[in-house]
């Protein structure tokens, strides 16, 4: 398989930290974190497939494993062992990267990783991820019908709140709508990943797992399955934040990440 080179932002020097963004987002979501960590760390933040300046979606479709493979050059650039920071879809990518090459990962920071396959593996629907299952299928149908704006409205409003997409600045909406055209691919990658829970239970590195009190049940359902099996996990619940906390409230999330990394890296 041809590995494309991802676009990435880079700042600082020191132990490596790779930050993986949420879907419908870009590496730009980590700008403030890069500035905070740069005095002590070498921080890299890539654009994933179909995001920002990242490569186009693979013609044959993609999976979480292909997302990990795309980032392989950055993992090498960060050096080993490095820290992985991931939000939402990016958290699922970071988790899989750690499971595939645990010897390369010093620590993990996860803000509500959306590895929905773990919930379905515990028991078939109806279950805790039915909300995102419904939203992803409806958004995917809208995207397939060519209505990117409707797809984005369904997807963004699910993760934030009703009216969130329409409340965004008009100049931002077209790029977000374009990115959400792959919502069916995201859902397939997150809901069919075959990695068993035991692979994550075997991880030895310290993990900071952040959750938001205002997040949808679908995010909390993953946390209920995953956090009890992680061997060295610190769970921090940020009651006033939602699923998009790293973007909407970086002033709350970033200090949590900074303090954790100061203790492990």
Image: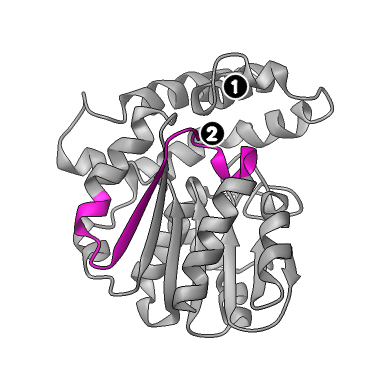
Residue in view at x 46 percent, y 61 percent = 109
* Residue ID for mark 2: 183
Question: In which quarter of the view is residue 249 placed?
Answer: top right
Helix, strand or loop at mark 2? helix
Residue sitting nearer the eye, 16 or 149: 16
> How far across and down, in percent of the image, does residue 182 sit?
58, 36
The magenta segment: 226-249
Q: Residue at position x 47%, y 83% from top?
A: 81
Is 246 magenta? The answer is: yes
Circle 1: element type? helix
Q: How many marks?
A: 2
Q: Are marks 1 and 2 in contact (CB under 8 Å)?
A: yes
Q: CA distance from mark 1 to mark 2?
A: 8 Å
Visible residue check, residue 54: no
**Which of the numbered marks, if any, corresponds to residue 151?**
1
Specify few, some or many for label 1: CA neighbours under 10 Å numbering under 14, 14-19, or 20 or more.
Answer: many
Q: Is residue 67 magenta?
A: no
Instruction: Give the x, y percent position of residue 25.
Output: 65, 43
């Amino acid at each position: 398989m041809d590995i494309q080179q991802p676009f990435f932002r880079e700042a600082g020097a020191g132990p490596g930290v790779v930050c993986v963004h949420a879907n419908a987002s870009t590496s730009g979501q980590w700008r403030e974190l890069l500035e905070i960590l740069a005095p002590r760390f070498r921080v890299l933040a890539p654009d994933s497939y179909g995001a920002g300046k990242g490569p186009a979606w693979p013609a044959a479709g993609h999976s979480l494993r292909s997302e990990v493979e795309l980032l392989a050059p950055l993992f090498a650039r960060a050096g080993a062992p490095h820290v992985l920071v991931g939000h939402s879809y990016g958290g699922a990518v970071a988790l899989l990267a750690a499971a595939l090459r645990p010897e390369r990962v010093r620590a993990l920071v996860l803000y509500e990783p959306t590895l929905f396959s773990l919930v379905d593996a515990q028991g078939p629907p109806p279950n805790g991820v039915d909300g995102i299952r419904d939203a992803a299928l409806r958004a995917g149908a809208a995207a397939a019908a060519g209505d990117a704006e409707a797809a984005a409205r369904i997807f963004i409003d699910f993760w934030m709140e009703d009216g969130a997409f329409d409340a965004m600045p008009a100049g931002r909406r077209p790029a977000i709508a374009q990115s959400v055209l792959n919502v069916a691919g995201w859902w397939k990658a997150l809901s069919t990943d075959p990695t068993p829970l035991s692979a994550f239970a075997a991880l030895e590195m310290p993990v900071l797992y952040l959750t938001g009190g205002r997040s949808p049940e679908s995010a909390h359902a993953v946390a209920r399955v995953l956090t009890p099996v992680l061997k060295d996990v610190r769970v921090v619940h940020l009651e006033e934040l939602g699923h998009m906390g790293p973007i909407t409230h970086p002033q709350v999330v970033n200090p949590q990440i900074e303090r954790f990394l100061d203790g492990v890296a």
